[in-house]
Amino acid sequence: MTMTTANKITIVRILMVPVFVVALLRYTSSGGEAYRWVALAVFVLAAAGDGVDGFVARRFDQRTEMGALLDPLADKLLLVLGLVVLSLQHSPRLDRIPLWLTGTVLCRDVILLLMLVLISYLVGRRTVRPRWTGKVATVLQMGCVLWALLKLDVVWLNSFAAAATACTAVSGIQYVRDGIRMLQSQPPQPTPPS
C-alpha cells in the first residue's frame, strides 16, 4: 500500500496528540505558561491539519481506505483527550469544561462505535453519510477546548458547551437512526432446511 501525502499528514496529526496532552498536563501541574502555549499551538495545528489532509485527498485524488480510517481517528483522539483532560479540576490555572459535555461526547462515540461494529457484522460494510449536526458539534467541541486553553470568559465556555452538548446528542440520535435503517434494509437470511 502506498503512503499518500494526505495519509502522511493524518499520521502527523495523530503523533501530535500525545504532544498536546503532555504539554497540557505539564501546564496544569507546573503552571508554566510556555506549556499552555505549546498545547494551544499543537491543538490548533492538529485541528487545522484535518482540513488540509481532506483538501489534499480530494484535490489530488488521494482517498484511501487507510485515510478513511485514520482521519476520524485523529479527530477523535485530539478532541476526546482534550475534553477529558480539560474536564478535570485544574483551578485556578484553567476553567473546567463541564463534565456533561465530555460525558455526552464519550457516550455518543461509544454507542456509535458499537453500532458500527454491529452493522459491519450483520450487514457488511456501509458508508455513513456525515450529518451537518455532527460537523457543527465537532466545531463547537473544538471551540470549547480553545476557549478553555485561551482562558476566556467561563460564562461563554458554558454556553458553547451547552450548544456542543445539544448538537452532539442530536447528531448521535441521527446516526443511530441511520444505523437502524441500515440494519432494517438487510433482507432476512433464509432459514436453513431442517
Image (cartoon, rainbow, N blue to C red):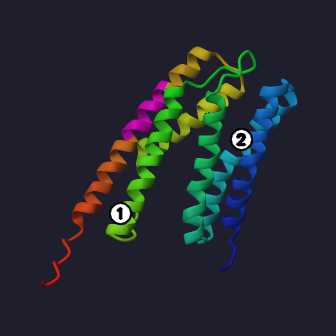
Task: Name, please, the residue furthest toward the bottom.
Answer: 193
**Is residue 178 toward the left or the right of residue 169 in the image?**
left
Residue where numbered disc 1 is placed: 119
Pick the residue in front: 171 or 77.
Answer: 77
**Magenta stretch?**
162-170
What is the C-alpha distance between the residues marked 1 and 2? 33 Å
Relative vertical location of residue 1 with respect to residue 55 in this rendering, above or below: below
Q: From the top left corner, tell me how far across and down residue 43 is, in percent.
A: 71, 41
* Residue at position x 41%, y 59% in the image: 116
* Label 1 CA crowd tier, 10 Å (few <14, some 14–19, many 20+): some
Query: Is 73 situated above or below 163?
Result: below
- Residue type, label 2: Phe
Query: In the picture, which quadrant includes the N terminus?
Result: bottom right
Residue farthest along the front direction in this orientation: 194
Name which residue lies at 66% across and 20% down: 95
Q: In which quadrant is the C terminus drawn?
A: bottom left
Residue 140 is covered by the magenta coloring: no
Whether residue 63 is visible to the viewer of this picture, yes or no, is no
Determine which of the numbered discs, if any, sits on residue 149 in the image.
none
Q: Amino acid at mark 1?
A: Ile
Secondary structure type for disc 1: helix
Q: Residue at x 13, y 85 (%)?
A: 193
Above or below residue 61? Residue 84 is: above
Q: Which mark is residue 43?
A: 2
In the picture shown, does residue 13 fall above or below 104? below
Question: Visible in this render: residue 167?
Answer: yes
